[in-house]
């Protein structure tokens, strides 16, 4: 560790990249408003118990990946590893369900998980997520898939795949768990250490194990279908019906189970062919029991979260969502002394009109200032020569076509208008 190295699994996002983030954030605002979502900002840290209860004690996130610390008042706090439990906490605490339903909320911000960093997997990463509360309607499960698809498409992304499954509810799961344990137990020696460890605690999680040597056993594992209660079965049939009716492409994946205890019924994940091992660009599902689990009135809910870094990686891989380099409206070239003061005054005026005005702060030669204007892709250069200033005029040079004209400094509004009309 040194003073000039950032912590493992974190990123600095600066010029050259941040423009893409801004573009994506703009798209997120567009798509969330089209679907009627409002933003909710929750704290970066929460009481540890929220995640233990919400996500589940026996999950990888809670067991191994949380950044948990005691504050000076000896309270156990945790940097949020995900956004769903905090949004549910805020929904209950703020009585957000008191008005008309459904309530649609979205969030955007950093999440923290102590995972092994690799391409597309970080310890601090950004999620755009959304949650809708107050309805069991299968159409909302489908909309929770369509909203992120709309976002991906509006960024120009192709080559993604939607996978869906149902994992039933607390009524149908016990008999399925039992069947899974009975299936796996005689073959336990063929399973990896982590599968063996989970076999009795959470047998459904074995289904999404990626270890090569487990695949043969896993491929023959029983499916949940015949254990589903009538309600879960009917719900899933309707989800599939709506997806078909709305022309959404998807793949049924009986082994999609997800690493959170809160899910009920439908779960989904979107993967991108552009990415390597960490190819999920978003995932979500229904969680009808979580609001009650966290102390609220029974309230069904469904949601989704997009991994922003992964989405940007996939977009960059396809050369999509490029940010054109924006340049100043005008670069003000001066000769020092009184010409610099006059240039500073004009720069101040142009900026007050919302125009990007740059000038030299390094007392460079005129040639070097012209070069700087070019390098920044400035649309105009304004040359504050002493002779012209004596007549209260300035030379305005269009950097695209080289055309030059003298402008009257009495008429700054007119000048700002010409410069502003060039766009950026
Ligand atoms: P999740 O599958 O854990 O779900 O995360 C959602 C997305 O966040 C993933 O598909 C991935 O794109 C991104 N992501 C997760 N971990 C990392 C990481 N270490 N580095 C980079 N990106 C990552 C949830 O978090 C649920 N709360 C989703 C949800 C919302 N379910 C219902 N509502």
Image (spheres, rainbow, N blue to C red):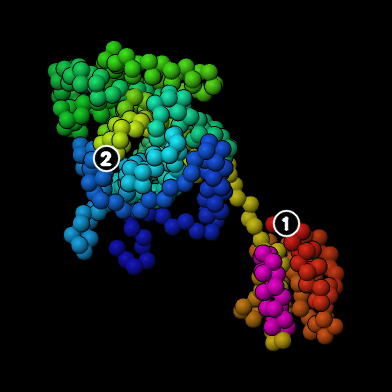
Residue 305 in sight in this render: no
Residue indicated by mark 1: 423
Residue indicated by mark 2: 294
**SS of the residue under disc 2:** loop
Neighbor class of circle 1 (other Cα within 10 Å; few <14, some 14-19, many 20+) is few
Residue 394 percent coordinates (x, y): 80, 76
The residue at 26%/48% (across/down) is 66
Pointer 1 and pointer 2: residues touching (CB < 8 Å)? Answer: no
The range drawn in magenta is 339-357
Q: Nearer the viewer, residue 271 or 168?
A: 168
The residue at 20%/62% (across/down) is 73
Residue 351 in sight in this render: yes
Q: Quadrant of residue 164?
A: top left
Q: Pick out the residue farthest to the bottom.
A: 337
**On screen, residue 172 above or below 156:** above
Residue 95 percent coordinates (x, y): 36, 43
Numbered tag placed on residue 313 in the rendering: none
Residue 124 percent coordinates (x, y): 36, 51
Residue 118 colored in magenta in the image: no
Neighbor class of circle 2 (other Cα within 10 Å; few <14, some 14-19, many 20+) is some
Q: Pick out the residue farthest to the front.
A: 99
**Quadrant, the C terminus:** bottom right
Q: Which of marks 1 and 2 is in front?
A: 2
**SS of the residue under disc 1:** loop
Q: Nearer the viewer, residue 216 or 26?
A: 26
Q: Pick out the residue farthest to the top.
A: 226
């Amino acid at each position: 560790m040194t003073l000039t190295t950032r912590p493992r699994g974190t990123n600095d996002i600066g010029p050259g990249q941040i423009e893409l983030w801004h573009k994506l954030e703009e798209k997120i605002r567009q798509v969330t408003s089209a679907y009627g979502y409002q933003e909710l900002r929750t704290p970066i840290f929460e009481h540890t118990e929220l995640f233990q209860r919400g996500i589940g004690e026996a999950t990888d996130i809670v067991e191994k990946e949380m950044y948990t610390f005691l504050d000076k008042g000896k309270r156990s706090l945790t940097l949020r590893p995900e956004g769903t439990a905090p949004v549910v906490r805020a929904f209950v605490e703020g009585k957000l369900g008191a008005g008309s339903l459904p309530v649609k909320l979205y969030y955007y911000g950093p999440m923290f998980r102590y995972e092994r960093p690799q391409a597309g997997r970080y310890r601090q990463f950004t999620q755009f997520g959304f949650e809708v509360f107050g309805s069991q309607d299968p159409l909302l499960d489908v909309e929770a898939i369509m909203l992120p698809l709309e976002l991906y498409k509006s960024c120009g992304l192709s080559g993604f795949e939607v996978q869906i499954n149902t994992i039933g509810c607390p009524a149908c799961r016990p008999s399925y768990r039992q069947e899974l344990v009975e299936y796996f137990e005689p073959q336990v020696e063929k399973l990896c250490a982590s599968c063996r460890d989970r076999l009795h605690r959470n047998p459904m999680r074995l289904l999404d194990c990626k270890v090569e040597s487990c695949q043969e056993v896993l491929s023959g594992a029983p499916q949940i279908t015949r254990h589903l209660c009538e309600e879960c079965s009917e719900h899933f049939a309707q989800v599939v019906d709506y997806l078909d009716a709305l022309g959404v492409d998807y793949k049924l994946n009986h082994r999609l189970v997800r690493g959170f205890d809160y899910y009920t019924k439908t779960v989904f994940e979107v993967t991108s062919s552009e990415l390597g091992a960490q190819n999920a660009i978003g995932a979500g599902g229904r969680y009808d029991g979580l609001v009650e689990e966290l102390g609220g009135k029974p309230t069904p809910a469904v949601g989704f979260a997009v991994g922003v870094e992964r989405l940007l990686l996939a977009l960059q891989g396809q050369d999509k969502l490029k940010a054109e380099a924006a340049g100043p409206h005008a670069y003000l070239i001066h000769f020092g002394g009184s010409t610099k003061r006059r240039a500073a005054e004009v720069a101040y005026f142009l900026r007050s009109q919302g125009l990007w005005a740059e000038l030299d702060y390094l007392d460079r030669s005129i040639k070097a200032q012209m070069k700087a204007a070019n390098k920044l892709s400035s649309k105009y250069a304004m040359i504050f020569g002493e002779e012209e200033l004596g007549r209260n005029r300035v030379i305005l040079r269009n950097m695209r076509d080289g055309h030059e004209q003298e402008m009257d400094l009495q008429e700054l509004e007119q000048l700002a208008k010409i410069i502003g009309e060039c766009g950026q």
